[in-house]
Image: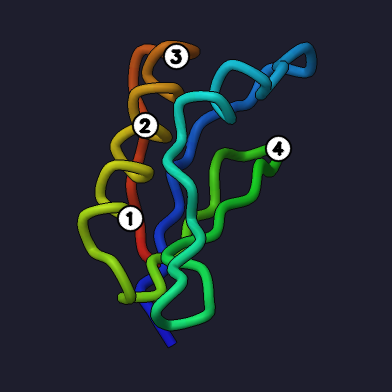
């Protein structure tokens, strides 16, 4: 269970996520033995799930993804799929 988000934008074919991966906080939440969040890079944007284990970590990760998307395009659409 958690909250799902889609950050919609056209991901460039040449997109390299290495810099993004360095910016993201660790999703591992040791007390709950699970991940605070998960994300995926899809052709139409980033898919993000906040597992509601550590809202601060998930919020930072979501902000990193939004910032990354806005660095690749002028506008994004944030939706709940």
Per the model, the C-alpha gap separating discs 2 and 3 is 14 Å
- Residue at the left extreme of this rendering: 56
Q: Nearer the viewer, mark 2 or mark 3?
A: 2
Residue 11 quadrant: top right
Query: In what element is the residue under mark 3?
Result: loop
Q: Nearer the viewer, mark 4 or mark 2?
A: 2
Question: Tag 3 or tag 4, which sits nearer the N-term?
Answer: 4
Pointer 3 residue: 73
- Asked if residue 70 lies left or right of residue 26, the reply is left
Q: Name the residue under label 1.
A: 58
Which residue is located at x 37 percent, y 65 percent?
A: 80
* Nearer the camera: disc 3 or disc 1: 1
Q: Of all residues shown, which one is farthest toward the bottom?
A: 1
- Pick whichever, 66 or 45, lies toward us: 66
Mark 1 neighbour density, 10 Å: few (under 14) some (14–19) many (20 or more): many
Picture residue at 78% right of the left edge, 12% below the top: 14
Q: Nearer the viewer, residue 80 or 17?
A: 17
Question: Outermost residue toward the right?
Answer: 13
> Which residue corresponds to mark 2?
64
């Amino acid at each position: 269970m958690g909250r799902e988000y889609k950050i919609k934008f056209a991901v460039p074919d040449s997109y390299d996520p290495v810099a993004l991966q360095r910016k993201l906080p660790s999703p591992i939440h040791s007390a709950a033995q699970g991940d605070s969040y998960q994300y995926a890079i899809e052709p139409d944007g980033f898919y993000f799930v906040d597992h509601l284990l550590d809202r601060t970590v998930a919020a930072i990760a979501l902000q990193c993804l939004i910032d990354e998307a806005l660095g690749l395009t002028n506008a994004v659409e944030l939706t709940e799929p």
